[in-house]
Image (cartoon, rainbow, N blue to C red):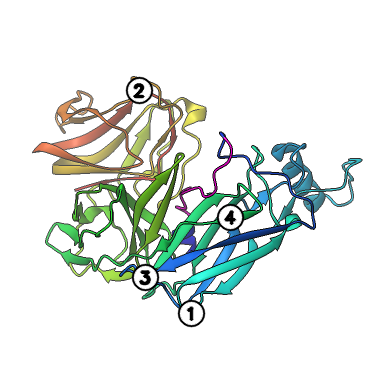
Amino acid sequence: MRKFIAASLALTGVACSGEDNPGKSPNFNDDDIVTISGQFLDASNQGLPSTSIALRNLRVFAYINPSQTYFKETLNWFISLAFPMFPTYEKASQKVKPNYFLKDAVTARDGTFRFQMRGEEVLRDADGGINITLINDGDGTSSAYAKYNFVVKSATTTLDPIALCDLGETVHDNAQTLDWSWTLPGYTLDHYEVRIADAQDNSLLWASRVEASATQLSLPKSIFQASTLRYAIEVFYRFEDGYQTSCLTPSRTITITNPVTNLARNKKAIGENIDFVVTSLTNGRFNDVSYFAAYNTKSVIIDLEQNTLISSINVHNLLLTSDEAPNELIFEGATQTAPNTFVSIGLDGETPLRFGNYQLPIPGSYARLRMSADHVLSSLQEISVQ
C-alpha cells in the first residue's frame, strides 16, 4: 500500500515563508538544531491524540553542501557504490547519501507534536531547498492519512494544523461501471484525486482528478483488468506559494463481481514507424513502454479484427514528449471492409490526459481504432476499450 500511495506525493503548503523563492532554505551548520512543530486534527477538526507520525526527507537522494550540484553528487554516489574499485578522485568528501527517514514521534493528547534534528540530518535539492514530508502512520485499511509537504524556511518552523479526512465514500458495482460517491467535506478544497491499484501488487491502474464541487465518479469497468482493487481518495485543500496540503482517506479494497471484458485485450497493437507488434499495449500487464520516442511515434492502432460495437476508449498512463500547443488527441475508427480508411468517431481535438476515459458521443461499430497525438509519445502503458 505504501508504494501505491507514496507514488503520488504532491508538494504542499509552506510555513514561515521568509524568502521570495520557496525552494531555497537557509544554510545550517551540522550542529545547528532545526525545530518543526504543529498539530494533527481528526476528521472532526479535533486534536488527534496518541498517533504515530513520521518526519521524512522528501528527496531520497539529495546533497548536503549547496555549493555542489545535485547531479554531480548523485552520480558520484552511485559510482562509488557500483564501482568501489575505481575512485572518483574528488578532493571534497562525499556529500550525497540516502537519508529518507528522519524522525518518528507520537502526538500529544491535543494532537500537537514537536521534532528537533541536527542540521547535518537534512538534505537539499538542486535549488538548495530542504524538502520535508510529514505523515501520520495510518495502517492502510482503517486509519486515514494526512501529509504536509513543505520547505524548511528557518531554524524554527511552526506548521498550520494538519487535518485527516474520511469522506465516508461508497462504491457501487454496476453492470458497466464502478461508481464512487462521497460526502462533501466542510472545509474549502481545490480538487480530489482518486487513485486505484491492483490489490495484489499495489500497481497503479488508474488515477482521476475530480473537481472540488463533485461528490461522485463513474468509470467504465473495462479499465480494470484486476478483479480485486484497492483505492484511496486524496483531498487537496490548502494552497500557499504554489504548494498544497492534502489528506488521504483510508485505502479500501473492493472486488468486481461482474467484470466487463476489455475489447482490446490481447489484440494486435501497431505503433507509427514501429515494425513490430506492440503487445504491451493490450496484454493487461500495464508495463511502461519507453521506446516510442526513439521511433518518433505519434499514433497507435488497435486492431479489433472484426467490427465491434465501441462506446469508450481508455488511455492508461499516457505521457507526451511536449505539452506545447497544439496539444490534442484524435481518435478515429475503420471498418472491416475498409481497414485503412479511418474516419472520425466524434473524438476530435481531445485533451491528452495521463489517465483518460474518452466516451464516444454515439457508440459505433469499428474493426480498427487509431489514436493520434500532436506530439511524439513518451510513454503509454495500456489502451482498453469498452
> Picture coordinates of residue 225 (x, y %)?
30, 58
Q: Check disc 2 and report the residue beneath it.
A: 374
Q: CA distance from mark 4 to mark 3?
A: 22 Å
| Mark 3: secondary structure | loop
Residue at the (37%, 65%) spot, across then down: 164
The image quarter containing residue 179 is bottom left
Q: CA distance from mark 3 to mark 2?
A: 46 Å
| Mark 1: secondary structure | loop
- Nearer to us of marks 4 and 3 is 4
**Which is nearer the N-term, disc 4 or disc 3?**
3
Q: Are marks 4 and 3 in contact (CB under 8 Å)?
A: no
Residue 246 horizontal side relative to residue 262, left or right: right
- Nearer to us of marks 4 and 2 is 4
Q: CA distance from mark 1 to mark 4?
A: 22 Å
Q: Disc number at residue 50? A: 1
Q: Is residue 178 above or below residue 190?
A: below
Q: Is residue 337 magenta?
A: no
Front residue of 341 and 355: 355
Q: Which amino acid lies under the numbered mark 4 shown in the image of this protein?
A: Thr
Q: Which amino acid lies under the numbered mark 1 shown in the image of this protein?
A: Ser
Residue 49 horizontal side relative to residue 23, left or right: left
Q: Check disc 3 and report the residue beneath it.
A: 42
**Which is nearer the N-term, disc 4 or disc 2?**
4
Q: Is residue 62 above or below residue 2?
A: above
Q: CA distance from mark 3 to mark 1?
A: 12 Å
Q: Check disc 4 and report the residue beneath it.
A: 157
Magenta stretch: helix, strand or loop mostly: loop
Front residue of 94 and 145: 145
| Magenta part of the chain | 7-19
> Picture coordinates of residue 174 (x, y %)?
13, 62
> Picture coordinates of residue 223 (x, y %)?
27, 53
